[in-house]
Image: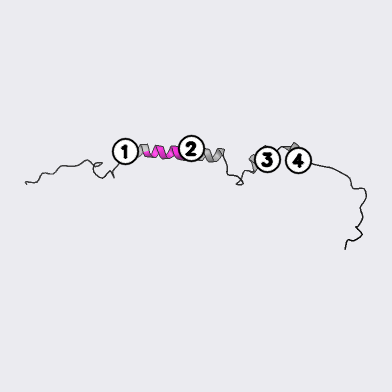
Amino acid sequence: PGKATAAAPSNAGGGGGLTDEQKKAAADKKAAKNAAKAAKKKDNPKKGGGGGAAAAAELNISALDIRVGKIIKAWEHETAD
């Protein structure tokens, strides 16, 4: 009978409780971070890790030194086994 009790708000005190708005903001921030990470990974694939199609698109055929010839005579070397 002589005790006075005050009801504390659920988010007061130790800071452990989050409001619905805070939870939504944290979830939105996490989703945005994951989306940015996925976009970065898509735009910049790791070197040597599945970038075969991109590497083929960047290949310049004029950089190759291709020589074509016809063999007209062949013989064994004198000291060959």
Label 3 neighbourhood size at 10 Å, few (<14), some (14-19), many (20+)? few
The residue beneath circle 1 is 20
Q: Which residues are magenta?
A: 26-35
Q: CA distance from mark 3 to mark 4?
A: 14 Å
The disc label shown at residue 56, or none: 3
User: Which quarter of the picture shows residue 22?
Assistant: top left
Which is more N-terminal, label 2 or label 3? 2
Q: Is residue 41 magenta?
A: no
Q: Are marks 3 and 4 in contact (CB under 8 Å)?
A: no
Which residue type does callout 4 highlight? Leu
User: Which quarter of the picture shows residue 52?
Assistant: top right
Image x and y of residue 61, in percent: 74, 38
Which residue type does callout 1 highlight? Asp
Which is more N-terminal, label 3 or label 1? 1
Q: CA distance from mark 1 to mark 3?
A: 50 Å
Which residue type does callout 3 highlight? Ala
- Closer mark to the observer between disc 4 and disc 2: 4
Q: Are marks 1 and 2 in contact (CB under 8 Å)?
A: no
Which is more N-terminal, label 2 or label 1? 1
- Closer mark to the observer between disc 3 and disc 4: 4
